[in-house]
Image (cartoon, grey):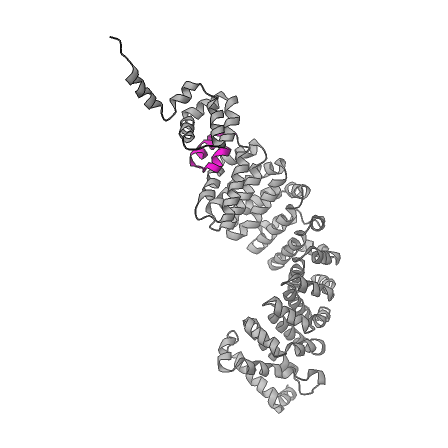
């Protein structure tokens, strides 16, 4: 310690660095405060000083000073994109990259932290990190004995890969994937988390990148971690599996073959909200591909689990569950019936009515449409659940987004095309715009000719009278349906409910000659 102190004090440059580090330490979470006292350029030069002439083996370098300087640079770069650009502009990255290969483990961790702090802000800054040769220097760090060095390297690699497919491909080409798979097998939980996160960032961009991770055998080591007690690790594992499964049927089948069901369904009840959401996302990405995969989820108890998740989740966390239910229901009437039997209509309607965000409402409308579009029984379940009226309200509301209006209209049309529940259809006849009325009238025109009780109820509920009033103001296809419905009744009944019937009776008084 005395020797290090003597070396530190013997160099004016190193002493200046130490002084600067002391200043920053006074406000470690407010680098902006420090920068108001000194210019950015001077500060960066101050912290870069310990790394100068690394490749000349200058004996004046003190690892502890280099570590502190790197940590300070990392804090500055992490604070804002402008400061990260300044770090790049002052050509500090090559010196940091060199220190990754030459210096002790503490300096390596700190240097990797700076690279991560720079890369996180934008694709351009991440590209600058790659251009500095960082990937070639980070890869050996994944093989270090010290797990914290591995963590720092994996974290930096993930931050580079997260931005674009090109950067992720550069990460893969550097040979990182196999080492990340080895890292996830290590006993340290933090290293497992960061490795899973880095693989997720690689997989998300394209099927080819996801396939590269699968070919390295990652899924076999990710899948068992679904039941790990650490919530933060389960978040990353579920996210990584979702990013793999989303791209294609083959990749989804690889994930399923790793036997994630039914264990991942238990994650929908996890105490951590992010675990629940990421698990639902993974299930959604599997369910969307084929009827067979959707059926596998249902047979594992997934229908009831997803319905419970949608019922209990709040806000945006509902979205993957809502969409998973819709994907499952879309494939066949049997799968849609499984959602109905699991009491899935009510929570979807609740989301449609109560959620403040239109994109969640739109997803709920879409899923309800997928459930109700198969048969009259499916449509009846939605009609009896009072779904039609709320779909119509979302469709015509002036504050609804365009996407919500479109999805509500499509869902309503799909359900109406199968609906034979006239009690639910009749209120829509009065409230709906013309473009929806024609679908309602089409159903009445197909049902009333064959059902005496329905014809009687239609008259008693005021439906026939409303049709005659409507016939005065519309034309085209609506008129055709109105004529077809009128033909189901005796002419005198139709005439009795026409708007001009009372005037016709009054005219008869004028023409009538009483006999005394």
- Image spot of residue 205 (x, y percent): 66, 58
Task: Determine whether 429 is above or below 456 in the image.
Answer: below
Residue 283: tell me if it is visible: yes
- Image spot of residue 26 (x, y percent): 51, 79
Q: Considering depth in this image, is 6 or 452 the residue closer to the camera?
A: 452
- Image spot of residue 63 (x, y percent): 66, 81
Instruction: Assign the C terminus to one quadrant of the image.
Output: top left
- Image spot of residue 468 (x, y percent): 41, 27
Residue projecting furthest to the front: 511
SS assignment for the magenta stretch, majority: helix
* Residue at 46% across, 46% down: 354
Instruction: Assign the N terminus to one quadrant of the image.
Output: bottom right
Q: Considering depth in this image, is 117 or 497 the residue closer to the camera?
A: 497
* Quarter of the rendering containing residue 338: top right
Task: Determine whether 241 is above or below 485 in the image.
Answer: below
Task: Determine whether 166 is above or below 473 in the image.
Answer: below
Task: Determine whether 373 is above or below 448 in the image.
Answer: below
| Badge count | 0
Q: Is residue 335 magenta?
A: no
Q: Is residue 424 magenta?
A: yes
- Relative horizontal placement of residue 90, taking residue 495 as reference (left or right): right
Q: Considering depth in this image, is 510 or 170 the residue closer to the camera?
A: 510
Give the magenta part as a residue range: 420-439
- Relative horizontal placement of residue 60, taking residue 488 as reference (left or right): right
Residue projecting furthest to the top: 516
- Relative horizontal placement of residue 131, taking residue 450 as reference (left or right): right
Residue projecting furthest to the left: 516
Residue 305: tell me if it is visible: no
């Amino acid at each position: 310690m005395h020797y290090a102190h003597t070396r530190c004090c013997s160099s004016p440059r190193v002493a200046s660095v130490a002084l600067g580090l002391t200043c920053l330490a006074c406000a470690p979470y407010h680098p902006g405060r420090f920068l108001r006292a000194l210019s950015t350029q001077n500060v960066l030069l101050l912290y870069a000083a310990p790394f100068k002439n690394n490749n000349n083996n200058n004996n004046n370098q003190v690892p502890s000073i280099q570590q502190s300087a790197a940590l300070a640079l990392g804090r500055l770069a992490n604070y804002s994109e402008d400061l990260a650009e300044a770090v790049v502009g002052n050509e500090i990255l090559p010196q940091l990259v060199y220190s990754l290969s030459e210096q002790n483990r503490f300096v390596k961790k700190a240097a990797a932290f700076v690279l991560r702090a720079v890369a996180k802000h934008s694709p351009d800054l991440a590209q600058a990190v790659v251009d500095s040769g960082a990937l070639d220097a980070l890869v050996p760090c994944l093989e270090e004995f010290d797990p914290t060095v591995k963590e720092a390297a994996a974290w930096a690699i993930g931050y580079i890969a997260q931005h674009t497919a090109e950067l992720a491909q550069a990460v893969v080409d550097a040979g990182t994937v196999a080492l990340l798979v080895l890292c996830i097998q290590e006993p340290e939980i933090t290293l497992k988390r960061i490795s899973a996160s880095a693989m997720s960032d690689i997989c998300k961009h394209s099927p080819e990148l996801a396939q590269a991770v699968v070919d390295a055998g990652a899924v076999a080591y990710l899948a068992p971690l679904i039941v790990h007690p650490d919530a933060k690790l389960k978040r990353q594992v579920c996210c990584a599996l979702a990013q793999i499964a989303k791209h294609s049927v083959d990749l989804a089948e690889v994930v399923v073959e790793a036997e994630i069901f039914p264990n991942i369904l238990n994650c929908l009840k996890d105490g951590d909200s992010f675990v629940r959401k990421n698990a639902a996302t993974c299930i959604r990405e599997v369910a969307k591909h084929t009827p067979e995969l959707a059926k596998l989820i249902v047979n594992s108890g997934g229908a009831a689990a997803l319905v419970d998740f949608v019922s209990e989740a709040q806000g945006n966390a509902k979205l993957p569950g809502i969409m998973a239910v819709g994907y499952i229901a879309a494939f066949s009437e049997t799968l849609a019936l499984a959602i109905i039997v699991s009491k899935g209509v009510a929570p979807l309607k609740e989301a449609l009515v109560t959620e403040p965000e239109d994109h969640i409402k739109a997803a709920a409308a879409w899923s309800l449409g997928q459930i109700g579009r198969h048969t009259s029984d499916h449509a009846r379940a939605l009609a009896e659940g009072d779904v039609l009226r709320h779909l119509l309200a979302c469709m015509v509301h002036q504050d609804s987004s365009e996407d919500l209006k479109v999805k509500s209209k499509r869902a309503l049309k799909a359900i109406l095309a199968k609906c034979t529940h006239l009690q639910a259809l009749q209120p829509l006849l009065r409230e709906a715009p013309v473009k929806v009325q024609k679908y309602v009238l089409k159903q009445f025109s197909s049902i009333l000719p064959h059902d005496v009780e329905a014809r009687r109820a239609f008259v008693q509920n005021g439906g026939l009278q409303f049709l005659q009033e409507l016939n005065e103001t519309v034309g085209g296809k609506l008129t055709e349906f109105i004529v077809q419905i009128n033909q189901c009744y005796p002419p005198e009944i139709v005439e009795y409910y026409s708007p001009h019937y009372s005037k016709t009776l009054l005219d008869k008084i004028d023409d009538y000659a009483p006999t005394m």
